[in-house]
Each structure stands twice: as structure tokens, then as C-alpha cells.
Image (cartoon, rainbow, N blue to C red):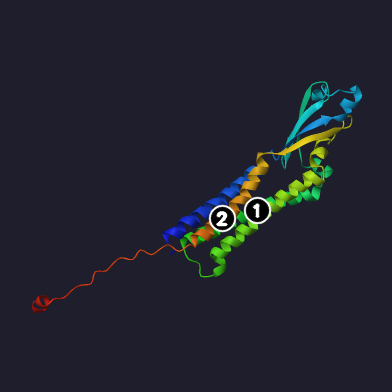
Amino acid sequence: MPGWFKKAWYGLASLLSFSSFILIIVALVVPHWLSGKILCQTGVDLVNATDRELVKFIGDIYYGLFRGCKVRQCGLGSRQSQFTIFPHLVKELNAGLHVMILLLLFLALALALVSMGFAILNMIQVPYQAVNGPGGICLWNVLAGGVVALAIASFMAAVKFHDLTERIANFQEKLFQFVVLEEQYEESFWICVASALAHAANLVVVAISHIPLPEIKTKIEEATVTAEDILY
């Protein structure tokens, strides 16, 4: 049986892995990976809008991995519309990259549960095989954190190099052309980053669990035998 010191740290490691699992689910469900400002370029060109009038043509957009929302501003008031990524919009995007991001996050969910299981195993008993011990915990956390990091990097690549926001903003637009003015990552994106950091923190936790505790030595008093004790 592992000592109380290691049990406490392995318990913390299992909680971190479970929190990573929950964070990834939240990031998948909440459609707030990225938000931005979109300009109705067609409307600006039609009325030859000045700088002061541009505000009438600037709308908003936000989206996640499955759905999102767009607010159009083309000079005649705002019009809000909801959209879903699947099954039609994904065809206008880099479908392979988008599906890969989802697959990586689903894989990260499984790896987070495996790393949690290994931490619980080490909290309950000392495994006979080294691969099931602390080394196994580190291995699964490295894999889980790396997969999440790869998903994050893939999403950033889709935004920066594949004009993800602009493609979504112009989906099914026949009359108007939208230009992206600014973009910023939102809470779902940072929740995913926190999930990767939770696995990195687990590596630190496992390392701390192997710090040897100072042994408390009790001083044993030596019994002194006198001549009177021998007589009795």
C-alpha cells in the first residue's frame, strides 16, 4: 500500500485528469471558441460610406466547433441568424482539418479517463509492473496533453491560414460580402487550453509525490543496569 503522502498526490492527479475531461466536454458543447467583428463590404461600397458611417455596417459573429451565431449589419438594421457547422457549412471549410480537431478532442477525452484510472490505481495499491506505476501516469498525461495541444494548434491554423471566420461569415451569402475586421479567442478556446495545462500540472504532481519525506526517528533510551538490580 502506498503511504498517505503519495495517496494524497495521486488523489490530486486523478482529480486533475477528471477536471480535464470535464473541461473538454464544456469546450465542445459551448459555441464560444472565437468571436469577431465583420464588415458588410457590399453595403459600404453601395453607399460609399464614410468612416463615421462604418459603424452601421459592422456586425458580430461567434462560433464553436458545432454551431454559432452571426449578426448582420448592412445598413438596414441588425439581423441575427444561427448556423450549424454540420452537415452543410463544413463543406465550405477545410473539412478534413475541422474533423481532425474533433477527433483529437474525443481522443483526449478517452486519454484523460485513462490517466485518471492510472492515478486511482496507484492511489489504491503499488502496481507490480512499472508501466502501470508513476511512469504510466506520466505517459498518459503527456499523450492527453499533447493531443489537446495539437487540437488547439489545429484550430489556430484553421483561423489564421484557412480564413475560418471569413468562410463562416460568407456562408450562403449571395448578395453581401463580409470582411473580418477583428478576431479574438473566447472562453471555450481558453477552457481547452486549461485542459492541456491540467495534464501538465499532473506531471508536476507525480514528480512531487516522489519527494522522500524525512523519517522521524524516535530516540530509544538505553536501560542502565546497576548492581542492585542484579541482586533483585
Left or right of 123? Residue 56 is right
Which of pointers 1 and 2 lies earlier in the amino acid sequence?
1
Query: Which image quadrant for residue 159?
Result: top right
Residue type, mark 2 in image: Asn
Check the picture and name the quadrant holding the N terminus: bottom left
* Residue 131, x across and y down, in percent: 57, 67
Badge 2: residue crowd in 10 Å (few <14, some 14–19, many ≥20): many
Amino acid type, residue under disc 1 in the picture: Ala
Q: Residue at x 87, y 32 (%)?
A: 177
Eyeballing the image, is 65 above or below 40?
A: below
Q: Which residue is mark 2?
A: 202
**What numbered label is drawn on residue 108?**
1
Where residue 142 sits, quadrant-wise, is bottom right
Report the side of 77 relative to 174 (left or right): left
Measure the alpha-carbon separation of dots 1 and 2.
Answer: 15 Å
Q: Residue at x 65, y 53 (%)?
A: 108
Query: Residue 14 — which label?
Result: none
Number of residues whose C-alpha sits closer than 10 Å to that of mark 1, classed few (under 14), some (14–19) or many (20 or more) = many
Answer above or below: position of 18 versus 210: above
Task: List x then y, in percent, for residue 129.
Answer: 54, 70
Quadrant of image for the C terminus: bottom left
Q: Is residue 70 visible?
A: no
SS at circle 1:
helix
Residue 217 on image: x %, y % = 33, 66
